[in-house]
Amino acid sequence: MILSDKTIKEMILSKELTIEPLQKNSIQPASVDCHLGDNFLVVEDRQMHTIDLNSEILYREIKGDSITIPPHSFLLATTQEYVKLPDDLTSFVEGRSSIGRMGLFIQNAGWVDPGFEGQITLELYNANSLPIRLEAGRRICQLVFCKMDHVALNPYRGKYQGQRNTTGSQVFKDAEAKPLS
């Protein structure tokens, strides 16, 4: 069941759900708007020849009030908001339609597991033929919350738990990752 604005407000007031900071008009009829942070990561492609699942990826960190994404380019960003989901609530991260119509694809694997806590890292891809300039503090995406039928037996307590700022891929820490030879 997707949560309504009424239920979202009640859960925030009762402290079952945490979204901080929560701006005045962020709660929408069936979602909560999130805002772009000022911390970004770009793959350090001058120091890497290939990205693979078993090696740590090198990133260059950029901090600033705005960022310009070149055409057909990818970067990681973060929300300003720090969220904490209870163990029986999940969330979908959806890009804003107005942003998508500019050619900016917003993703975070699309899903926030029950029990997750942290700022949400967003994958941004400029599919346009022109650069796209983004400003920190602007609405960038929305969280749609879904109540689960039961509390998760194994809520999220993974490698991204408690993340602050933009966090690069930690796939090389997966249990099935092969040790480097």
Image (cartoon, helix red, strand yellow):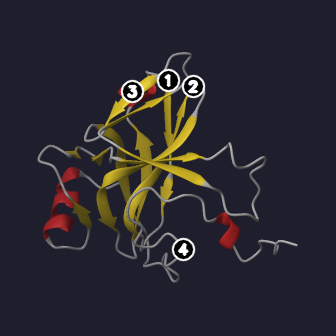
Instruction: Find the distance from the CA under tag 4 to the CA under tag 3.
Output: 31 Å
- Of the numbered discs 4 and 2, the one sitting upstream in the chain is 2
Q: Which mark is residue 103?
A: 1
Q: Residue 47 at x, y = what percent?
A: 69, 49
Q: Are marks 1 and 2 in contact (CB under 8 Å)?
A: yes
Q: Are marks 4 and 3 in contact (CB under 8 Å)?
A: no
- Of the numbered discs 1 and 2, the one sitting upstream in the chain is 1
Q: Residues within 10 Å of mark 1 (few under 14, many from 20)?
A: some
- Secondary element under disc 2, as helix, strand or loop, is loop
- Of the numbered discs 3 and 2, the one sitting upstream in the chain is 2
- Of the numbered discs 1 and 3, the one sitting upstream in the chain is 1
Q: Residue at x 41, y 74 (%)?
A: 115
Name the amino acid, label 2. Answer: Ala
Instruction: Find the distance from the CA under tag 1 to the CA under tag 3.
Output: 12 Å
Q: Which residue is mark 2?
A: 127
- Secondary element under disc 4, as helix, strand or loop, is loop
Q: Residue 61 at x, y = what percent?
A: 47, 51
Q: Which residue is mark 4?
A: 159
Q: Are marks 1 and 3 in contact (CB under 8 Å)?
A: no
Q: Residue at x 30, y 62 (%)?
A: 82
Q: Are marks 3 and 2 in contact (CB under 8 Å)?
A: no
Name the amino acid, label 3. Answer: Arg
Q: Are marks 4 and 2 in contact (CB under 8 Å)?
A: no
- Of the numbered discs 4 and 3, the one sitting upstream in the chain is 3
Instruction: Find the distance from the CA under tag 4 to the CA under tag 2.
Output: 30 Å
Q: Which residue is mark 3?
A: 133
- Of the numbered discs 4 and 1, the one sitting upstream in the chain is 1
